[in-house]
Amino acid sequence: MDEFPSTAAAVTPGWIEAQLARAGLLGEARITGLEWKAIGTGQVGDTARFTLTYDRPTAAPPTLAGKFASADPTSRGTAAAMMLYVKEVGFYRELAAGIAVRTPRVYGAEINAEGTDFVLLFEDLAPERGGNQLEGCGLADAEAAIRQAAALHAATKGHPAVLGADWLHGREGLLEQIGTLYHQAHAIFRERYDGQLAADAMALCDELDKRVEGWLGRQPEEPCLIHGDFRLDNMLFGVGGGAEPIAIVDWQTCAIGCGMTDVGYFMGCGIGSALRRPNEAALLALYAEEMARHGAPMAEDVMLRRYRIGALHGLFTAVFSAAFVVRTERGDSNFLSMARGAAELALDHDSIGALDAMMENAEC
């Protein structure tokens, strides 16, 4: 495999020129200036914006975005072990262009054999409004996200290119390893957030910990591609100065699963109870309408059963991530917010009861 820059500081004009030339954008132009600055709030990868100057007019963009492995060894080690970098590079290489979801166009996607270093070079969607998990969003943004979820799930349900992608299935023994690590994560999470998370929510964490192997081992009835971390921090709104309503980024947790996992995750830990509770029925109805419009209708009772179980994904992710990515003040607040919203949704709909029924009946 050719060498590639594994940090923003290692990116050179020549390397970017090669990517843009491959995309047919550079023409006879050459880059005469290259500057970069860190952007984003991700804890698993590091992101930068590159500002370019050229020696002549060109169709090549003046700015680009790049993503790299985290400089933090804890986050980097977790990402490599969970195949997160492998999944994101695989998504952009093999799947992104074939689904009706707005994602950044990718000009370069490279990863090393160990899955520990990678680079993604994207179109820059600025000016845009980055979603903020701690600030929440309005109803219009939530509706835009739900439409994207339906577009993703409907287009990839039963799709051979998705179901046959080895890198989406993970390596042998990975689920067992995650289960073991989750019990450790639960102990860390419980100690860290004791007194901050409501007692009934923490009790729900305890109940999920008892059932995590069943949670991890569930088999979706109608498998499709899911994003896996479908929340505001991974969404850009009003992209291109408002030319488009939304784009979805950060695909390192994409997987084969049940589409309502994304929806339950978003409605719980994504938007929080204040927006969800008065608009929940309407947003679920919108998802059903969009799925039908895309040719993948779903019975209401099936959707609601899967939704109840999907709500637990936010709780699982908050607990696991809090223990195994670099710890920051924003991260601590973020995981608490995620756990709180996901737990409130799960308690509203007795998600543990739904999980127990699933484990008994082998349903998604």
Image (tube, rainbow, N blue to C red):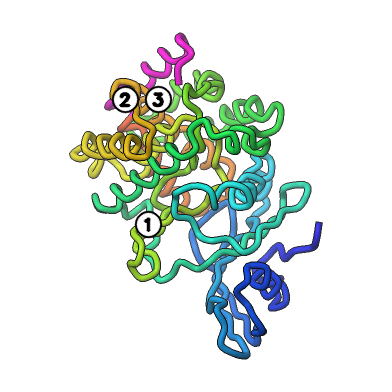
Q: Residue at x 58, y 61 (%)?
A: 106
**In the rendered view of the protein, which quadrant contains the C terminus?**
top left
Label 3 belongs to which residue?
309
Amino acid at circle 1: Ile
Q: Nearer the viewer, residue 210 or 25?
A: 25
Amino acid at circle 3: Ile
Label 1 belongs to which residue?
246
Assess whether residue 113 is covered by the magenta stretch: no
**In the rendered view of the protein, which quadrant contains the N terminus?**
bottom right
Q: Are marks 2 and 3 in contact (CB under 8 Å)?
A: no
Percent of width and height locating residue 126: 43, 70
Asked whether residue 41 is in view, the answer is yes
Assess whether residue 358 is covered by the magenta stretch: yes
**Residue 192 vertical placement versus 179 (above, below):** below
Side of 188 where 118 appears, left or right: right
**Is the stretch drawn in magenta largely helix, strand or loop?**
helix
Give the magenta range: 346-364
Percent of width and height locating residue 320: 53, 36
Tag in front: 3 or 1? 1
Amino acid at circle 2: Leu
Q: Residue furthest left?
A: 278
Q: Nearer the viewer, residue 184 or 261?
A: 261
Side of 41 where 179 appears, left or right: right
Label 2 belongs to which residue?
304
Q: Residue furthest top?
A: 360
Tag in front: 2 or 3? 2
CA–CA distance in space, label 2 to label 3: 9 Å
Q: Earlier in the sequence, mark 3 or mark 1?
A: 1
CA–CA distance in space, label 3 to label 1: 26 Å
Q: Earlier in the sequence, mark 2 or mark 3?
A: 2
Q: Considering the numbered disc 3 on the image, is that residue within a helix, a strand or a loop?
A: helix
**Residue 116 vertical placement versus 297 (above, below):** below
